[in-house]
Amino acid sequence: MTNITIAWMALPFFIGFVIYLLPKLDRFLALGIALVSANYALAIFSTQSLLNIQLLDNFGVTLTIDQLSGFFIITNAIVTTAVIIYTWSSEKTAFFYMQIVILHGSVNSAFICADFISLYVALEVISIAAFLLITYPRTDRSIWVGLRYLFVSNTTMLFYLVGAVLVYKANNSFSFTGLTGSPPEAIALIFLGLLVKGGIFVSGFWLPLTHSESQSQVSAMLSGVVVKSGVFPLVRCALLLEEIDPIVRIFGVATALLGVGYAIVEKDTKRTLAFSTISQLGFIMAAPEVGGFYALTHGLVKSALFLISGILPSRNFKELRDQPLNNSIWRALAIASFSISGFPLLSGFGAKILTSKSLLPWQVVAMNVATVGTTIVFAKFIFLPHKKSEEKGKVSFGFWWAMVILLGGLIVANAVYYQAYTLSNILKPLVTISIGWLAYLFIFRKLILKFPRGVEKFDHLIGVMSLMLILVFWMVQI
């Protein structure tokens, strides 16, 4: 399994350059890489064993492959497959598919890294590949959004790298377990880097503009898997180290509430989805034990929703209420929205139940509020008008096959936690959804409220880093 793992890690980068040399095979090679990752993830689930790989001793690479990694890897495989098929009939060049493959491979690497230096390399490659995908249209707007993303990412990774050096100085090891016994400033610096990369709490205010202004398939990759490369190490550290767990859970709760609050009042569809991503990342961190399954569910849902947003007649909810959607498109939109709201028969139901059962007592009230807020957010999509349309040919076959993969995945993944189907477990989300829908129809649908966007400006994003560094340092000291 060790040799297979090393080959699997290296293959996307090799194929990425092969794609550039053989552009006529770009789609097929990219799809093949995604399917290889899917098979690797299934092998992890079938063996159900923990694999640790140590290369070059303390100075080298430490890899950990387990069930948690498996959930994140299968998410990456399914989302990448759907995005490639969605893009199949477009005019995207080999360069686009090459970056998709390199992004896919570097994200997979982040999901099995267990040392800070290897993770640093993976995160930096992710940043470069994501930047090239964001700027692919080569418009002034896309280039600025991409540069903004790259500047924020590179700045925060400098803090992260200093923290990694301090961990090594204290323990002669870059391993995640080296956080134990490391000085508080080391933990604070590393956490700052991961919080920004993952779009967590106020460090995530770079995310709405980046995700909403990128092309739909790029937004699907960013929201479905890329931001999870920053969340995964936090979840891993919480599971490994008892003293880290409370910090991760606190940020999880705060992030869930912050993101859903902004998403409720947002009037733009893609920005709503982006703020919802921030909130859902909080759910993953609030219950690290089941974060992998929640990440899978969220990745499939949010990728589907971003792909759907790309074919809607408008991004403005007010305009969408005056332009009924095609019934078929609305059904796809509704299935994804039902799942993330926790409706039974979809994997979002099991993920919500598992998360609620893994919360600590002090988290319950806040996370219930965030859950109701999520149902309010996606009621905005569910209650959009729709009708049978005679117009055909406007949506490519790739879109529908991508929906089959992503929404079908939500149905299949529902079997992961079939034990959730008890009467009490079914009633609770139904009541929650009813409350959220009523709140939307009678309060929030008519509410005119807009939060200022000043906090999303580049200079504010850099300034927030220093505040977050102080906050995390204070939390570690307590």
Image (cartoon, helix red, strand yellow):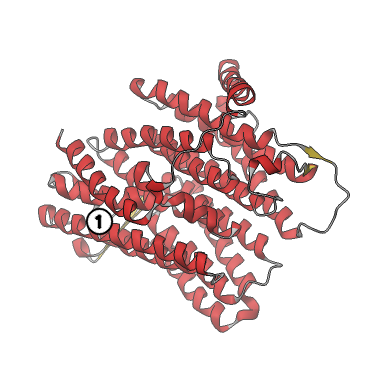
* Residue at (38, 61) in percent of width and height: 2
Quarter of the image that includes the C terminus: top left
Badge 1 marks a residue whose secondary structure is: helix
In the rendered image, the vertical position of residue 29 relative to residue 258, given as above or below: below
The answer, for residue 124, to whether it is visible in the render is yes
Whether residue 219 sits left or right of residue 468 in the image: it is right
Q: Amino acid at mark 1?
A: Tyr
Whether residue 6 sits left or right of residue 32 in the image: it is left
Residue with the most extreme bottom position: 21
Picture mark count: 1
In the rendered image, the vertical position of residue 262 relative to residue 196, given as above or below: above
* Residue at (77, 41) in percent of width and height: 324
In the rendered image, the vertical position of residue 333 relative to residue 362, given as above or below: below
Return the residue nearer the eye: 425 or 184: 184
Return the residue nearer the eye: 372 or 444: 444
Read off the residue under disc 1.
160
Image location (x, y in percent) of residue 466: 23, 49
* Residue at (51, 54) in percent of width and height: 211
Image location (x, y in percent) of residue 214: 54, 59
Quarter of the image that includes the N terminus: bottom left
Image location (x, y in percent) of residue 41: 50, 53
The answer, for residue 38, to whether it is visible in the render is no
Return the residue nearer the eye: 393 or 122: 393
Residue with the most extreme right position: 390
In the rendered image, the vertical position of residue 192 relative to residue 420, given as above or below: below
Name the image quarter holding residue 318. Answer: top right
**Circle 1 residues within 10 Å: few <14, some 14–19, many ≥20:** many
